[in-house]
Image: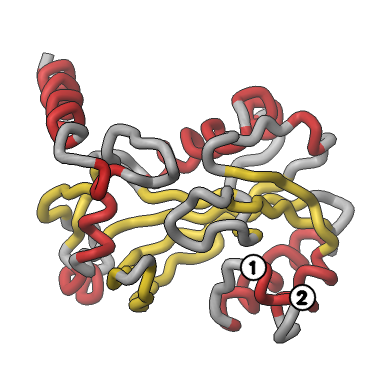
Amino acid sequence: MWKEIIKTWVDWVKSTISTWGTDVLMETTHTKVAELVDILDKQVYLDTWEIKVIWSVVKAEAHESWEFHQAGHVWIYNSKWEILLQKRTQGKDVDSWLWDISAAWHIEMWESMEKWTLRELREELGEKWINKALKIHQPEHIYTYIEDIKRIIQWKDWHNNELNSVYILKYDWPIEELEKQEEEIESIKFIPLEQFEQEINDPEESKKYVLQWPEYYEKLFKELKKRLKK
């Protein structure tokens, strides 16, 4: 009974927030219901590695106010030593028209990282392929890190103060089986791991990517190559 009551309340909150205006609700060029994210106590996490939720806010507000929240990344790879990339749509407010992680997201209010990872993979890349992939492989968590940076996006301060969990997932079927989320993803492609590694380190080629810092890629490539060499 309590779960039903809570779900009803969450649906009401989202519906109410969706009337606040498009400034907060614009993720792409289309208006949609606001995403609510949990704000975490950063000091508690730094001291104890425990997740303590303080309150929940609209995702855009979390970035504007430098609030500490959770996000996730999944890098999809195959036995051919290739990695899957997605190109962000031109309508995205942040890093539009750039090649990015296979799948990335924010964790919505009251959701677990594990549950939300599978949900977002299905949403961004389709139901059929993930069901097939999960019969053989599960997303593997390789590490968690804190990202704390400030950028200027459309003349506004944009703060990434995030606890990011990074996963990898093996996928050995044709790319045509993936069903990209049209409003979020312009296109997808597999690229040789070696080529990707070279391009992100090239001053000109790297401009077409949403870049992470060197330590991020060092860890990612190490974990991918370790599994591919088996």
Label 1 sits on what residue type?
Answer: Tyr
Which residue lies at the image location 34% right of the left edge and 42% below the top edge? Answer: 112
Q: Is 69 or 57 nearer to us in this picture?
A: 57
* 193 lies left or right of 13: right
Residue 184: horizontal and vertical position, in percent? 53, 42
The image quadrant that residue 199 belongs to is: bottom right
Up/down of 19 relative to 198, above or below: above
- Look at the image and tell me in which quarter the C terminus lies: bottom right
Which residue lies at the image location 47% right of the left edge and 42% below the top edge? Answer: 117
Instruction: Write down the residue under mark 1.
Output: 209
**Under tag 2, what secondary structure?**
helix
Q: Count of labels shown?
A: 2
In the rendered view, how is the structure colored? secondary structure
The image quadrant that residue 218 belongs to is: bottom right
Which residue lies at the image location 52% right of the left edge and 55% below the top edge? Answer: 73
- Look at the image and tell me in which quarter the N terminus lies: top left
Which residue lies at the image location 56% right of the left edge and 75% below the top edge? Answer: 216
Residue 195: horizontal and vertical position, in percent? 84, 70
Instruction: Write down the residue under mark 2.
Output: 199
Residue 51: horizontal and vertical position, in percent? 23, 58
**Under tag 1, what secondary structure?**
loop
* Residue 140 seen in the current view: no
State if disc 1 and disc 2 touch (CB < 8 Å): yes
